[in-house]
Image (cartoon, rainbow, N blue to C red):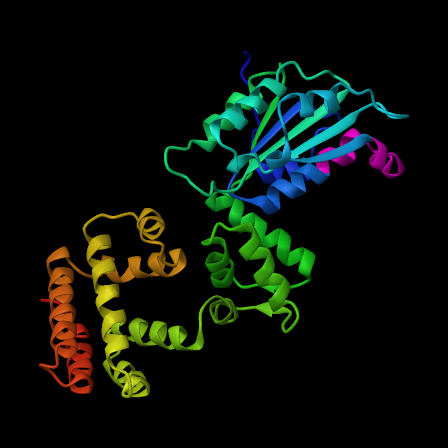
């Protein structure tokens, strides 16, 4: 068993400059199907440059329909037709059970040089308990000397670069805050879809455009209200609160949630890790870091108590919600002592 070569520089560097001669075995893993598809396209172009010969020399197999390792071995063993290389793509291995994954491991052993076997192990398992997709991909790649292991996941810096690449392709300019907000998703499909959609209506993407794309109008108003509270702009916050007088419990819940986040951040929680663990918008959590820096953990804890007690009394009918919302806003806007 030989260790695979990991791509240096990440998936975007690979896509920008794919190898002229792909190795006999390439294993893709990581979250992004979109990036995996782009990598497969690049590999096929490099291995079979003549587009007219690809129908005869490129096979795409659904991993869930394979009977055994022989289904793959037979394809990679076949000689190319009027071409130097033959490409066999196995898609969807991420959702296979262990026995079926073991069969793919067998098929990956000693792939002949005339073939380029691509195992697409990208995506998230439908049943992730106990699974280690990265290790599974490494096990596939270990079967052939000189194999390539490619992580189809965007890092924070790669996400920002991907925003720039998608913006250039869509023909739009992206403001710095909007770029940061899009990159914070670290989701290639989300970034591309957002910019493709926004490019239909604007040539300059601002943070408000991204926010309107990502969240509902009602949620955007809650962001505005909370931002005014965190900036201690009491008059603006009270004016925005009037839009919620027909349903004031919602803003109270939102402010309570923000108070909890700010307390956690003020106590040392990392914004990216907190957003990932709670499933919240990572850009917005990052923006709350500023509010967390302006307050002590004790004062942040006080705000948690204020909002939670107010919310509980409103839900149980012990307090009138509109008046309580206004009182909470005033108290949260006070300069901490």
Please identify the residue farthest to the top as the structure is shown.
Answer: 1
Residue at point 64%, 69% (across, down)? 203
**Depth order, front residue of 294/189:** 189
Residue at point 24%, 71% (across, down)? 253
Magenta-highlighted residues: 42-56
In which quadrant of the rendered view does residue 66 lie? top right
In which quadrant of the rendered view does residue 38 lie? top right
Residue 321 position, x and y percent, is 18, 83
Question: Quadrant location of the C terminus?
Answer: bottom left
Taking the image as drawn, is residue 178 in sight?
Answer: yes
In which quadrant of the rendered view does residue 57 lie? top right
**Depth order, front residue of 189/60:** 60
Residue 305 position, x and y percent, is 11, 66
**Depth order, front residue of 216/74:** 74
Question: Quadrant location of the N terminus?
Answer: top right
In the image, residue 34 above or below residue 173: above
53 drawn magenta = yes
Which secondary structure type mostly characterizes the magenta part of the structure?
Answer: helix
Taking the image as drawn, is residue 24 in sight?
Answer: no
Residue at point 25%, 64% (across, down)? 257
**Depth order, front residue of 296/138:** 138
In the image, residue 186 above or below residue 43: below
The count of marks equals 0
> 256 left or right of 298?
right
> 23 left or right of 188?
right
180 drawn magenta = no
């Amino acid at each position: 068993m030989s260790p695979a070569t990991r791509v240096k520089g990440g998936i975007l560097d690979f896509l920008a400059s794919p190898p002229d001669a792909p190795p006999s075995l390439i294993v893709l893993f990581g979250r992004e199907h979109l990036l995996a598809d782009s990598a497969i396209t690049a590999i096929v172009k490099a291995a079979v440059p003549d587009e007219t010969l690809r129908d005869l020399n490129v096979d795409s197999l659904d991993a869930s329909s394979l009977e055994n390792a022989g289904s793959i071995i037979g394809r990679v063993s076949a000689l190319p037709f009027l071409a130097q290389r033959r490409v066999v793509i196995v898609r969807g291995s991420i959702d296979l059970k262990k026995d079926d994954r073991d069969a793919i491991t067998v098929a990956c052993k000693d792939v002949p040089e005339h073939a380029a076997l691509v195992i697409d192990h990208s995506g998230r398992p439908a049943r992730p308990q106990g699974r280690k997709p990265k290790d599974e991909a490494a096990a596939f790649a270990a079967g052939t000397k000189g194999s390539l292991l490619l992580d189809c996941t965007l890092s924070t810096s790669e996400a920002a670069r991907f925003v720039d690449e998608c913006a250039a392709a869509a023909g739009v300019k992206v403001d710095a805050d909007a770029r940061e907000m899009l990159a914070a998703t670290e989701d290639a499909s989300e970034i591309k879809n957002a910019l493709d959609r926004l490019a239909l209506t604007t040539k300059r993407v601002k943070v408000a455009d991204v926010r309107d794309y990502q969240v509902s109008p009602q949620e955007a108003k809650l962001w505005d209200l909370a931002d005014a509270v965190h900036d201690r702009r009491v008059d603006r916050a009270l004016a925005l609160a009037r839009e919620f007088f027909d349903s004031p419990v919602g803003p109270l819940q939102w402010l309570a949630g923000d108070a909890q986040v700010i307390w956690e951040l003020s106590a040392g929680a990392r914004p990216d890790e907190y957003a990932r663990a709670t499933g919240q918008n990572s850009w917005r959590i990052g923006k709350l870091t500023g509010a967390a820096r302006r307050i002590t953990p004790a004062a942040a804890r006080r705000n948690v108590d204020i909002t939670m007690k107010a919310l509980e009394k409103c839900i149980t009918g012990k307090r009138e919600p509109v008046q309580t919302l206004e009182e909470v806003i005033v108290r949260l806007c006070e300069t901490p002592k």
